[in-house]
Amino acid sequence: MCFSRVNHSKAVIKFDGKQIITTRFGTIPVIVHRPIPDGFAIKTATITQKADGYYVSFSLEDKSVPSLIPKDNIKTAIGIDVGLKEFLTTNSGEVVSVPKFYRKSQSNLARKQSKAARKEIGSNNWKKAQNKIARLHQRIARQRKDFHYKTAHKLVKECDLIAVENLNIKGLARNSKLSKSIYDVAWGAFMERLNAVAVKRGVHVVKVNPHNTSQNCSNCGQKVPKTLSVRTHSCPKCRTVLDRDENAAINILNKALNEVGIILSACGGFDIDRPVKQETSEAWIQLSLFEKLLL
């Protein structure tokens, strides 16, 4: 149920910080996840039924959201390439592993579904078995969401510009043997959450065309055709040898910087512990190259 107005004189739903007051259902006590921040105005409310109970979600208005960092003030930039072998690879070679939340829960899910199939449809035992399945799916979704947000905050905290691919995920997953793995990593959900986190900090997220980002050499631009099974980029023209995903991440960053009007002079990276981020100025980017670091 969605309510377009909250705490309005004519609204059918109100919230006083401890309970929801409705004209139809009366007063409903709630467990408050966190208090409403000062200066925020509650605009809408949505009541949703989930496997473990009912939830109410408020949308809030905050006029203090920062504007995007001006292009001239961009100091650090990073390109990321998402994949199935590694969840993402940066242009410096740093990787974030695929957590495989659904894959790890498959056997447990199969057992619960098998038990539910032996119950009489519509019976109380069948409903309990279905609820256990729903709760497991909910747990997987929450694990994935938490992982996405933590990864997004890590990237946004360290960079002023993040370059990503504008992927057609439904097209990639359609009629593919890898569709289950593609939906498990949930690139689309991650991109949406990355955008949401970046907006709060005024960070640029630039989506680029993924065409030939894996095939072109990031050093000389030579096209080096390779199948998905080939995980190393080896250019016969300039003798550059890189991990396939790292090469793609550099190409993604190059495209993004060209789109926003920043000239790239070298390829660089991002790391939490050491200053291997790409350093930019008003007209050019100076980059320091370091050895590959893994998480």
Image (cartoon, grey):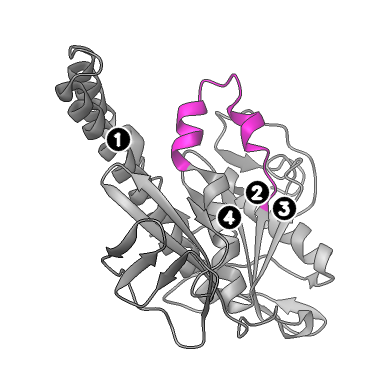
Residue 258 picture location, percent across and down: 82, 64
Q: CA distance from mark 1 to mark 3?
A: 45 Å
Q: CA distance from mark 1 to mark 4?
A: 24 Å
The disc labelled 2 sits on which kind of residue? Ala
Look at the numbered discs 2 and 4 and tell me whether their residues touch, using CB distance below 8 Å.
no
Residue 167 located within the stretch drawn in magenta: yes
Q: In the rendered image, which residue does mark 1 sit on?
A: 134
- Tell me the element at label 1: helix
Foreground disc of the pair 3, 2: 2
Q: Where is the C terminus found, in terms of image quarters?
A: bottom left
- Tell me the element at label 2: helix
Residue 192 picture location, percent across and down: 58, 55
Looking at the image, tell me whether mark 4 or mark 3 is earlier in sequence order. Answer: 4
Relative vertical location of residue 90 with respect to residue 11 in this rendering, above or below: above
Which span of residues is magenta-colored? 165-185
Residue closer to the observer: 39 or 190 = 39
Residue closer to the observer: 160 or 148 = 148
Q: Is residue 262 left or right of residue 24?
A: right
Q: CA distance from mark 2 to mark 1?
A: 38 Å
Q: In the rendered image, which residue does mark 2 sit on?
A: 248
> Residue 250, which numbered label?
none
Q: CA distance from mark 2 to mark 4?
A: 21 Å
> Residue 218, which numbered label?
3
Foreground disc of the pair 2, 4: 4
Residue 140 picture location, percent across and down: 33, 42
Q: How many marks?
A: 4
The disc labelled 4 sits on which kind of residue? Glu
